Image (cartoon, grey):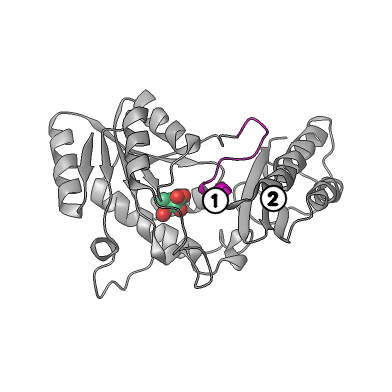
Amino acid sequence: MKILRTPRELREAVREARLRGESIGLVPTMGALHAGHVSLVQAAKRDRCWCIVTIFVNPTQFGPNEDFSRYPRDEAGDLARCDAAGADAVFLPEVADMYPPGSATVVSVRGLTDHLCGPARPGHFDGVATIVSKLFSLAQPDRAYFGEKDAQQLAVIRRFARDLDFPIEIVGCPTVREADGLAMSSRNRYLTPEARQRALTLSRALHAAEARFAAGEREVATLAAEIARILAEGRPTKIDYASIVDAETLQPVAGRIERRALVAVAVWFERTRLIDNVTLVP
Ligand code: PAF
């Protein structure tokens, strides 16, 4: 497995892989890798890609009061996990390499960021879209792999990739869960055992909504009430949102669910904000 530290090294490794006739698969991450990330590498390998994992805690997607400085960093553990998962290369740039002095360009996707995490995390998706578009430009992958747990992020990336004509297939991969249903997240490690137990209400609430929907319930108000009831059982510190939105536009659904919808929640337990979602397909 190649370790690449600079954009120049990344470009050179990609050039060599292309000369060998490889397809390039990109797995952008912020490190603190878990089984969800491993599933992205495995998906790239299943697609027979030469798989590059990028590990970069991107400062521009964190708000001033967010967890940038305490975000978990574990380079040795991450490299071992990438190697074991079958990655072919890992790119670990420095902040100064990705944002040299004078960097002034931001990629911003309008509309899709009006709801869900957008209002609670101003600037977050601009930071994500900007760094991912830079990684796309540097690695020029054929495919790029992202988890469906970050459903709004995935929608934003699909949209700017299309709008900016990146010839890249964006592959969404299913959320990987712990045995008890908690969606895998690098931030789960912040949870105390007690808060972790309370956090199981996220997946329980979403699962209950799915079950009611499968049994024929289509009223947003009824599903939302069931979700709110179960989330409250976890005594959350704060609920940023528990929303049912159109899966395409991410605009709130009113009345009945007639099209593919996303049920998405963002909930705080002490200082930790967790998100999760399920898709409902009529
Ligand atoms: O999902 C993440 O880990 C990050 O938002 C991403 C896509 C790597 C961009 O920094």
- Which amino acid type is shown beneath numbered disc 1? Arg
Task: Name the residue beneath numbered marker 2.
Answer: 195
Could you tell me if residue 36 is visible in this image?
yes
Percent across and percent down for residue 232 are 82, 53
Pick the front one: 206 or 113: 206
Residue 30 in magenta stretch: no
Is label 1 or label 2 in front?
2
50 horizontally vs 272: left or right: left
**Magenta highlight range:** 178-189
Residue at 66% x, 49% y is 246
Position of the N terminus by quadrant: top left
Checking the image for residue 12, the label placed there is none
**Residue in the picture at 56% in, 40% down:** 184
Q: Residue furthest front?
A: 193
Residue at 72 percent across and 53 percent down: it is: 243
Q: Is residue 46 above or below residue 87?
A: above
Local SS, label 1: helix
Q: Nearer the viewer, residue 233 or 172?
A: 233
181 drawn magenta: yes
Does the residue at mark 1 contact the one at mark 2 (Cβ under 8 Å)?
Answer: no
Dot 1 corresponds to which residue?
187
Q: CA distance from mark 1 to mark 2?
A: 12 Å
Q: Amino acid at mark 2?
A: Ala
Residue 227 locus on image (x, y percent):
80, 47
Q: Is residue 68 above or below residue 200?
A: below
View extreme (bottom): residue:
102
Residue 241: give x, y in percent of width and height. 70, 58
Q: Is residue 198 left or right of residue 7?
A: right
- How far from the left and from the top, in percent, is residue 254? 78, 54
